[in-house]
Image (cartoon, rainbow, N blue to C red):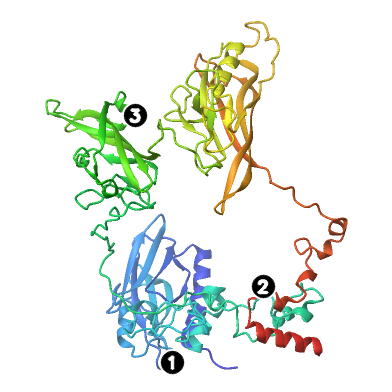
């Protein structure tokens, strides 16, 4: 039996001393021994801490003999170490800190990551009162150089491998060049001794280096799992691990260094004139000054571009939000002259001005300026443009501008609306088609009301604002192919008459469908009822019966129509120039009822309750031809159905099918035939 080292013997004595002092109620460090691997450690000194002095010394045991701890000439600071004491409730928090910092380690090391500790010392912290030692704390310091944080990487250009033959990043956790990254076991810059320190905590998965896992069809993959079927050895793919389908997933392009100081966007300021030989769809509209005719539009990032060119035959309806403090009015469009060489001249917009009636709809967060005597200014809150086109030319431009007068120093957020429509030159009004002949997705569903003189109408839904009340809700049209759910809130009192409530709810819901017919096609003629107009099928709300006597049940109403379901049947009706045309087969509206009860808080006060009413639109596509029914064989024998069975016999010749994405097809066929012949 060999002798123990001095440090180990002193540790055992300090542990025994600490346990006995805790039992006796004397001073003691908790814990009495610390293995230090960072720049600072802390311990607690418990017991009678009044008048206690804490000091530090560095023990020298090169000769194998530790000195006897004494508290006569100790101090709380050395050349490399410092001790701070934080008082608490009958506890002193003692912190020992390395003063030089970990950068000192890297400056003394010549290699990227030293295998021996940078700092290897033994510290003794002592607590004394009037010179006699009362408690000791032994600290074994063993700190390695943290090259992942302090090592300067080389400036050499990284060689990027060919992604077709080996992974682009075989070790993704290797983040620092020329240094060992902790917990990255695939880092080649970590020695075996250093890897042993964190081998049990290595990063797993692709980040840890598993970038080429065996794919499911590989024969060797079946030996590591027990869930493979019996036929797997017959149809598996025999391929080396280096030939993995995960290779080639990266973009195969040229690699060239490029330095850019900041984010820059290239903008082609030279306007290209497309109007000399007539416009095509998407061409920017030009002015006689060889400049783009611009109107604010929404970009892909959701921001408004103030000088966006207007594209020929492209309609849009956008809203831009602007702070009035930075708002600047655009140049007047009255002087703009649109180039139209095909007609031998120019087109000047015809502008009509209107005054905004409700300024609160356009400006929010308004602040009253202190100086109300300043001159007012005019701002445009809405701009509506109608372009009349004929073949590849523009024949007329009508503009309607809604403007408002505000204070010159007005503050707030202004919402502007810009609408652009392109109409055929022979169209008598501003009504646009929803398709020709079939409906286009996102276009309004055309409707007709034969019970009034102006029979052109639209099917609507609510667009709530503010508190969501029905009294302040606006309308938006029902767009073809878009399933939507909208609603608003009705204010109802506790003494509300149930019959009146039902009539009010039905009236609100009926206001959305003020039509008798719906257009079958997107170009159905409003003046000819026989040109593809279908009568709307309405299912009335159920009769609730007689109401209970007045005053018997206040705050309760049964069978209140609160939901309107709009179901539209659509179908494909052929194709025009390869584009599928869709048409409407029928439209049905149906009410659903709910039981309403006044919701009381702690007390039932005479406040208005809220009843939510809603309307939903559902487009149901009917196939042009019914699908072929399944045969009895397909229903009963599911083993031949690849979607319902793990065995897929139709893919027996897997390497010859389109599902195989492995080797070159000729090589895979040869290997497959040889495996069958064996």
Q: Is residue 200 above or below residue 535?
A: below
Q: Which residue is mark 3?
A: 361
Is disc 3 placed on a helix, strand or loop?
helix
- For label 2, count other residues whose C-alpha is less than 10 Å away and answer few (under 14), some (14-19) or many (20+): few
How far is mark 3 from mark 1, CA to CA?
88 Å
Quarter that holds the C terminus? bottom right
Q: Looking at the picture, tell me which residue is in the foreground, 541 or 141.
A: 541
Foreground label between 2 and 3: 2
Q: Which residue is mark 2?
A: 658
- For label 3, count other residues whose C-alpha is less than 10 Å away and answer few (under 14), some (14-19) or many (20+): few
- Disc 1 and disc 2 in contact, CB within 8 angstroms: no
In the image: residue 360, left or right of residue 43? left
How far is mark 2 from mark 3, CA to CA?
59 Å
Residue 90 x %, y %: 41, 57
Q: Looking at the picture, tell me which residue is in the foreground, 146 or 328.
A: 328
How far is mark 1 from mark 2, CA to CA?
76 Å
- Disc 3 and disc 1 in contact, CB within 8 angstroms: no
Kindly tell me whether residue 97 is visible in this rendering: yes
Residue at x 76%, y 64% (from the top left corner): 642
């Amino acid at each position: 039996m060999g002798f123990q080292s001095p440090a180990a013997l002193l540790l055992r004595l300090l542990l025994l001393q600490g346990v006995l002092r805790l039992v006796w109620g004397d001073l003691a460090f908790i814990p009495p021994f610390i293995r230090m691997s960072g720049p600072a450690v802390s311990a607690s000194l418990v017991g009678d801490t009044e008048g206690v002095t804490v000091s530090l010394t560095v023990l020298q045991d090169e000769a194998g003999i530790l000195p006897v701890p004494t508290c006569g000439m100790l101090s709380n600071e050395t050349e490399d170490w410092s001790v701070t004491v934080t008082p608490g409730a009958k506890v002193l928090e003692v912190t020992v800190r390395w003063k030089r910092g970990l950068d000192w380690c890297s400056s003394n090391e010549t290699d990227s990551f030293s295998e021996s500790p940078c700092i290897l010392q033994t510290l003794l912290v002592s607590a004394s009162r009037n010179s006699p030692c009362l408690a000791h704390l032994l600290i074994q310091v063993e700190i390695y150089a943290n090259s992942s944080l302090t090592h300067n990487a080389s400036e050499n250009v990284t060689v990027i491998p060919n992604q077709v033959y080996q992974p682009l990043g075989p070790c993704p956790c290797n983040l620092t060049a020329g240094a060992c990254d902790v917990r990255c076991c695939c880092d080649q810059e970590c020695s075996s001794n250093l890897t042993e320190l964190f081998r049990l905590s290595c990063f797993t998965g692709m980040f840890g280096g598993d970038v080429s896992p065996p794919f499911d069809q590989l024969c060797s993959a079946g030996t590591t799992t027990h869930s493979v079927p019996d036929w797997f050895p017959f149809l598996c793919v025999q391929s080396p691990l280096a030939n993995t389908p995960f290779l080639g997933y990266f973009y195969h392009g040229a690699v060239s260094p490029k330095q850019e100081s900041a984010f820059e966007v290239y903008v082609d300021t030279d306007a290209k004139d497309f109007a000399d030989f007539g416009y095509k769809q998407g061409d920017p509209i030009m002015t006689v000054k060889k400049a783009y005719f611009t109107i604010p539009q929404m970009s892909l990032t959701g921001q408004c571009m103030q000088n966006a060119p207007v594209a020929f035959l492209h309609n849009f309806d956008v809203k831009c939000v602007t702070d009035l403090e930075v708002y600047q009015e655009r140049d007047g469009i009255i002087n703009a002259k649109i180039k139209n060489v095909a007609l031998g001249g120019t087109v000047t917009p015809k502008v009509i001005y209107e005054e905004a009636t409700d300024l609160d709809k356009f400006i929010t967060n308004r602040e009253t300026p202190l100086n109300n005597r300043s001159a007012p200014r005019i701002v445009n809150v809405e701009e509506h443009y109608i372009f009349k086109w004929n073949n590849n030319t523009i024949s007329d431009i009508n503009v309607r501008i809604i403007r408002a007068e505000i204070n010159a120093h007005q503050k707030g957020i202004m919402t502007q609306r810009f609408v652009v429509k392109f109409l055929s030159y022979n169209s008598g009004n501003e009504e646009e088609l929803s398709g020709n002949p079939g409906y286009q997705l996102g276009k309004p569903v055309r409707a007709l009301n034969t019970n009034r003189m102006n029979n052109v109408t639209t099917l609507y839904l609510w667009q709530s604002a503010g508190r969501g009340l029905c009294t302040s809700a606006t309308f938006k049209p029902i767009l073809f192919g878009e399933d939507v759910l909208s609603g608003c809130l009705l204010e109802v009192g506790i003494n509300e008459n149930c019959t009146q409530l039902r009539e009010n709810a039905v009236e609100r819901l009926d206001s959305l469908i003020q039509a008798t017919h719906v257009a079958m096609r997107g170009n159905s003629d409003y003046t000819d009822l026989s040109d593809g107009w279908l009568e709307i099928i309405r299912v009335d709300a159920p009769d609730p019966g007689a109401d209970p006597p007045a005053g018997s049940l206040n705050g309760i109403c049964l069978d209140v129509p609160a939901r309107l379901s709009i179901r539209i049947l659509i179908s494909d009706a052929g194709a025009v120039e390869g584009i599928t045309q869709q048409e409407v087969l029928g439209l049905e509206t149906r009410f659903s009822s709910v039981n309403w009860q006044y919701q009381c808080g702690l007390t039932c006060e005479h406040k208005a309750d809220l009843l939510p009413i809603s309307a939903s639109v559902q487009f149901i596509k009917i196939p042009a031809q019914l699908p072929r029914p399944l045969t009895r064989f397909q229903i009963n024998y599911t083993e031949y159905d690849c979607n319902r069975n793990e065995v897929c016999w139709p893919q027996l010749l897997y390497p010859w099918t389109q599902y195989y994405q492995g080797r070159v097809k000729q090589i895979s066929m040869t290997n497959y035939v040889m495996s069958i012949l064996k």
